[in-house]
Amino acid sequence: MIRYALHCDRSHEFESWFQSSTAYESQVKRKLVTCPICGSAKVDKAIMAPRIVGKKGRGRATPPPEPASTPAPEAAPSGPTSLLMAQERELRTKLKELRDHIVKNADNVGERFANEARAMHYGDKEHRPIYGEASPEEAKSLIDEGIEVSPLPTLPEDRN
């Protein structure tokens, strides 16, 4: 992770963390980095002093320093970031609805999924909607045989 000191075209200063310098460049180009004070997407890196760790500090995990606090804006900016958040929520809702529809209207065949899908594909069993479990190797084998399969959508909250 990289922490950059940033400033907008209105001279507001703030900090933000990025996965890499490439991620920063990509997000700035797509106008996803916005000033938390005014919402401006015209953002540049500010001059920063490098953080140097001496020999005594190596090997010890220390949490990164807290970013400098900035005054809260009057109202949350309605820029690209908030739009993406709204789109993500909408997509998650639709994925959950899709998964719930499949679970409600298809038979769960569990670990027999690959065998059941093959049997239906080759005409040994009547076609019906099914879902179940398959290893990555089994799923690849089904696809290689021309059998259409798709994973059920999972969301972060499903992993709790």
Image: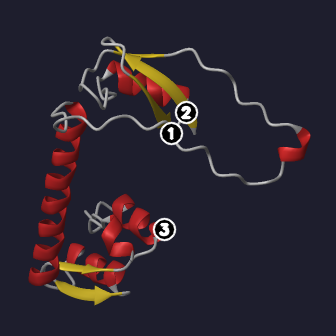
Residue 115, x across and y down, in percent: 34, 83
User: Pointer 3: what residue?
Assistant: 137
**Can you tell which of label 3 and label 1 is closer to the viewer?**
1
**Can you tell which of label 1 and label 2 is closer to the viewer?**
1
Report how many numbered discs are placed on residues in the image.
3
Residue 37, x across and y down, in percent: 28, 29
Label drawn at residue 76: none
**Can you tell which of label 2 and label 3 is closer to the viewer?**
2
Crowd rating for badge 3 (residues with CA inside 10 Å; few <14, some 14–19, many 20+): few
Residue 143, x across and y down, in percent: 35, 61
User: Pointer 2: what residue?
Assistant: 3
Q: Quadrant of residue 34?
A: top left
Name the residue at 31% across, 15% down: 42
- Work out whether mark 3 precedes mark 1 in sequence or the reverse, and give the earlier one: 1
**Real-space CA distance between mark 2 and mark 3, rounded to the nearest whole angstrom:** 40 Å
Secondary element type, mark 2: strand
Task: Name the side, left or right, on which 88 lies relative to 105.
Answer: right
Label drawn at residue 67: 1
Residue 48, x across and y down, in percent: 60, 20
- Work out whether mark 2 precedes mark 3 in sequence or the reverse, and give the earlier one: 2
Secondary element type, mark 1: loop
Q: Are marks 1 and 2 in contact (CB under 8 Å)?
A: yes
Residue 156 to residue 69: above or below = below
Name the residue furthest top.
9
Q: Amino acid at mark 3?
A: Glu
Which corner quadrant holds the C terminus? bottom left
- Work out whether mark 1 precedes mark 2 in sequence or the reverse, and give the earlier one: 2
